[in-house]
Amino acid sequence: MEKRPFSELGIAPELLKAIESLGFEQPSPIQSEAIPPALEGRDVVGQSQTGSGKTMAFAVPALQVIEPDKRAVQALVLCPTRELAMQVCAEVHKLTPFKPGINAVPVYGGSSYGRQIRALKQGAQMVVGTPGRVLDLISRKDLKMDALAMLVFDEADKMLDMGFREDIDKVMSSAPETRQTICFSATFSKQIRNLIDSYTREPATITIEHKALTVPTIEQRFYEVRGRSKLETLCRVLDIEDAQKAIVFTNTKKAADEITDALVARGYTADRLHGDLTQMMRDRVMKNFRVGALDVLVATDVAGRGLDVDDVDIIFNFDLPYDEEDYVHRIGRTGRAGRSGKAINLVAGKEIFLLQRIQRYIKTKIQRAKVPSQEEVANVRVDQQFEKVKALLESGDFKGHDATVERLLDAGFTSTDISSALLHMLLQESEREGEEIAEDRGPQRGDRRERWNEDVRQGDDRGGAPRRGARPDRGPAREGAHGPMVRMFINVGAVDNVNPGQIAGAIYNTAKLPTGSLGGIEIFERSSYFELPEALADQAIRGVRDAKLRGRKLRVDYSDGFSSRPPKPQFRKPGEKRTKKLISGDPTKEPFFKQFMSGGKEGSGPKGGSKFKGKAGGKRRKK
């Protein structure tokens, strides 16, 4: 395919200047082929993957056709997801600094109508939105299509997969027949062909070669493990790779929740992204991931397309997708803009047949790898500390302790023993590094604490699961009124606006525990920990299984081998403490717990009180 510079594509000078200011030197293949016919006014149909530059391929023609002085919607872009709509709008604004007067507005569900309607009334010339919200605004007569000159389908195949065909048809019935239509899709399936035939006129068709759907800079491999061993394998590979940013893809929202909770319990900075989150929560999660406050993002395919994060180091397919195209879009989140990246697939049982189908589709052999052993993970941590000590010695930027070393030598210890003891202390300190936050600095990424407790030690080198009935070491037991106490995990935290009394009330009401059996409760950003007699632990796990608190389905589990120290907080914010500790140490003696158990008025607690709903239909226990 012939490569032409932007200056030869017919782009207006003010847009060329913006493209140059963004640092682009030459157009991508889809831009080079799609922009010229679009600027000529022809309908365009293009096959292109995410990350190939298709946004500019339709944004440039749309901006060139828009008249800034005309305060009416002249271009409409339909996107499958809210994230993609916001990303497209952001990219459009980057192209407008030298063509003032153009206003592009994203519209999508899960956000206030008021702000979007005000933006439309102020004279937005371009609207980027999801089909459902666009149709709502058209039916309310807040979005007028009379002046529409261009309509764009971005990732049309995804919109059809998500069931938007009926909404698209209704939107198109309101569009002028004289409009120009541009359609981009990763595949040209029968449904896409039907859409193209219905709404385009003699389009210019651009097809990217099938082999170009994969990114050559991505290293792909798979681990064949038993299904119950996937989590342990994921953690081991995360530690071996030491990635700064990783995305873990799952097929279900439930799996995303459970994996996130498990990673948080093991000390990783992780969060989830799926369709059940509000727009505010999605925005916060993505912001934290972009700025590096999260190491791991666990996502369903809602995040497979439309995420604009260029520096993702590694992609995990915890569950292999059922559609080969989804696999391509998932791994396309890494290895972007010429960077190298890694795609790791965790394969269990019959998923091996899915993997074979994917390999045939992408025409690439995915290499099988051996799951890192516990010793290999430990060796990586030692190597990391070795490099740190070596760098410090080479820099000479440290205080001498010759007198202390001389005293140890005089006591009969060899220099090798002294160095080994100091390195041993250093490694132990690094294990606790994620647990403590010094007040003079935020927590550093560093080495995570030892995670390979009993459930991994009892497995094999392929990431085998522990023996049936085996439980991880839960640290030293503390004697309570009802027997030895253990530390437990529950998947709600400060982000859910809960307090210790509400958590205690939820557990007491659903698990029917004896009054006074719960110990202290510590609340972190997205999870909490509490003490409970070991004899009652299984009762608590089973009891809360169908309960909800603050709209979150509750899950209780053992704290997965942690000592009495709290886990590393999820978000690294320097100087900010994460825990909310009880004044008395006993949740049953706290005022808000007594009010919760006595059926106090809704909203009496912090930020509106509890919205707890359990097995008993949400009824609170009365005195």
Image (cartoon, grey):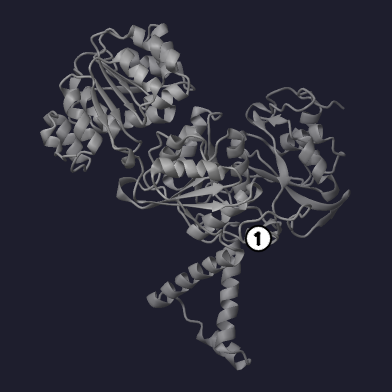
Rendered image quadrant of residue 554: top right
**x, y (%) of residue 487?**
74, 51
Name the one closer to the observer, 598 or 280: 280
Rendered image quadrant of residue 541: top right
Please give the name of the residue rendered at 39% of the width and 22% of the height, measured from the top-left corner.
Answer: 190
**x, y (%) of residue 143?**
35, 11
**x, y (%) of residue 256?**
58, 38
Neighbour class for label 1 at 10 Å: few (<14), some, many (≥20)?
A: some
**x, y (%) of residue 23?**
21, 43
15 versus 440 height, above or below: above
Q: Is residue 207 visible?
A: yes
Determine which residue is flagged by label 1: 460
Left or right, 597 with reference to 307: right
* Residue type indicated by callout 1: Asp
Q: Is residue 122 visible?
A: no
Quarter of the image with the C terminus in it? top right
Name the one closer to the observer, 97 or 304: 304
